[in-house]
Each structure stands twice: as C-alpha cells, then as structure tokens.
Image: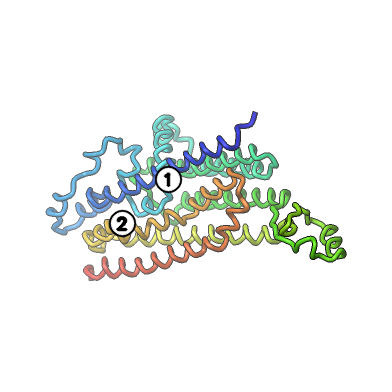
Amino acid sequence: MMWPASQASKVLTLLLLCILVYCIYMDTFLFLRIRNYKIDVFEYNNRNTSQDTSTHLAVLPSYEDVTWVPCSINPLCHPTVKGLMVDPVNHYIYGPLCAIVDIGLGISENMLFLTPNMISFFHVFIAFIGAKLLTCQALALRRVGIVLFQLRMFLDDLDGHVARERKHIKGERSEVGTLGYWVDGISDLVGVVAMMLGILWYLKCNPPRRGYKGTPVSTLPYHQLKEINSTEDIEKDHTAEVGISYKTKVSFQRMVQVIGLFSGQMVLSSLAWNRYIDVYQELLENCTDYDVFRRETMFKSGVFFFATGLWRIVNPHSYLHLLSLAVFCDKTWGFLKAVHYTGYVLLVIAVGTSEYLVGNIRSFVISDSR
C-alpha cells in the first residue's frame, strides 16, 4: 500500500524545515567560530614567519579546547576557503557522515586498496542506475533514483575525505591540477549529465502540459470550435461560464531549451565556483609571501563570509539538491521553468560580488608586502 500523499508531504515538509533550521544554526556557529578562535592555516603560517604575532596569538583560544564534538567529525573545527563555499548539506550533513563511515570502516587506514579514484568511478556507476530509474513512469521508482543520486553525492564527498585523510590534510581543500582533482571533476560531470538526460527522457515520454483559457463557448463560431477540438495534442479540460480551459503538451524543443538553460547555469556555476576557490586559496591560504595578519583579518571579516555564503547557495551541488527535491516531489518541470532564467540573476550577483572582493583582497594583502 502506497504511503498517503498528504502524510508524505507533511513529513517531507517537516524534514526540510528541520534541515533548513539546522543549516542556519550551523552557519551562525561557523561564523562565530571563525571570528573568535584560531584558524589552523594562519597559525601554521605564523609559526613559519618572522613576524611578531605573539600578542595576536595569545588573544585567540583554540576551538578544539572548547568544543565537545570531536574534530574528527566536527565540520566547524578546520574552516578553510573551500569549506566556506561548500553547500550546507554537503558540509554539515554529508561531511560528518563521511567521517563517521570512514572511522567505522577504517577506509583511510586499513582499506588501502580502495583508492579515492575507485570511489569516484563507483559513484559514476551509481549515477547511471539512478538516471535509468529517473526515466520510469512510476513516481516511486523515480524517488529511488533520487535516493541513488544523493548516495552518489555522498560518495563524491567520501572520495575527497579519504584523499585528505591519507594526505593528513585538515579541512576542505582543492588540490588544483592533480590527477584526483581531474578524476573527481570528470566523474561529477558524467554523473550530472546522466541525471539531466534521465530527466529529459522522462519529460519526453511524459510531456508536461501548459494551459490557457479559451473564449466563452457562446461567442465562438462553430467552425472554430470544430477546429480546436480536432487539433492534435489539445484536450478540452472543462466547460465553464467563463470559457474553455485547454491544455497543450509542451514541445520537446521547449523541454530541451529549459533543461539546456538550467544545465548552462550549472556549468557556469561550477566554473566560477572552482575559480574563486582557487583564487581565494591562493590569496589567503597558499601564498606565504603576503602579510599573514592581513590575510587572517580578511578571512575573518563579515564581508568575506557573506561573499562565500553566496556560493553556498548557488554552487552546483546546491542546484543538484534543489533539482533532486523537485523530482522527488514530482515538481520537476515547475522547478525547471521557475529557475531556468532567474537562476542566472543569482549567479551574476555572486560572480560580481566575488570579483569585486577579489580586487579588494588582493590590494589589501599585497599592499603591505611590497
């Protein structure tokens, strides 16, 4: 027996509300943690520079000394540029789960035969199965497909976690240019393409309909009524005093256009997101030639937290989570129509804010270094 739709909607709404409150709560504590405690990367740079920062070091306590959640699973312990730009679901839910699974199974320490790249290849295989299920008529099977795609995203987090643990890297970081970086990126691309093709195929076989109001029956000539009622792919919905409602099937060309525009957002978001992670890492974390105190000051600023917060909303993983939710609720076409243009507005705002901030950061951290 199927779960009643009304009960499922209530439970899902409550679950989403809890996740939203949890993510806002964690974002608030992440900001307070950054402002009030030491940051690993800057403490390391302080110890390896000749600058007199002893007064500054004495002011800030260590977060590890005050938190009751072990740093092995605590997403707030080791904040980094990439950590500030990862979407909340991956950072606050999948990240700790990856750590728990890794500790429980001993993947990083004991299962050395299982490489991060092997995990990446496996989640591509999961994506193909999920994409096939997304083409099914039954909503229950499409929901199973979405669960598989969420598993794929979890495994995408797990491969990065295992790679960092084996290299003893604390916090989220992008090692741009390495083999693992490209394997992970290509695997993500293949998985997303599979998901979009599965959705497109389902919509092609089950085209959504768009409706419009016709002229009242009493005012329509007979030959027009006959012409409308005999047209293919047009159904007479009902007759009312105000007129006739008709529903026409959305053309396949229109579906390709909408999904293409949404996919374009994801591509641009992915390119921009990775670019600004790389730029921010270079300016604030990697380059020790720049003044460490100024870099830390910028990293702890509310402006930087706001700019990176925009990318927590418009990064490609957030797009996938929202699309997954729409498919799960059987609102795929409505969601795609709602964001296939408006999503670009948020993307432009995020890029513009980041580009402006990059210039300010560069002038701020470099000016004292010359």
Its colouring scheme is: rainbow
3D distance between C-alphas at marks 2 and 1: 30 Å
Give how far across and how far down residue 20 sits, in percent. 42, 45
Image-based side of 55 in relation to 280, left or right: left
Quarter placement of the C terminus? bottom left
Quarter placement of the N terminus? top right
Q: Name the secondary structure under disc 1.
A: helix
Label 2 neighbour load within 10 Å: few <14, some 14-19, many 20+:
some
Q: Compare residues 21 and 278 and report the one nearer the observer.
A: 21
Q: Compare residues 320 and 223 and report the one nearer the observer.
A: 223
Label 1 neighbour load within 10 Å: few <14, some 14-19, many 20+:
some
Residue 337 visible in the snapshot:
yes
Give how far across and how far down residue 177 sits, in percent. 45, 56
Residue kind at label 1, given as amino acid type: Leu
Residue kind at label 2, given as amino acid type: Glu
**Image mark for residue 20:** 1
Q: Residue at x 16, y 58 (%)?
A: 50
Image-based side of 191 in relation to 49, left or right: right
Which tag, 2 or 1, sits closer to the chain's start? 1
Q: Is residue 117 above or below residue 364?
A: above
Give how far across and how far down residue 266 sits, in percent. 53, 57
Q: Residue at x 34, y 60 (%)?
A: 282
**Image mark for residue 285:** 2
- Residue 244 figure quarter: bottom right
Q: Residue at x 33, y 45 (%)?
A: 170
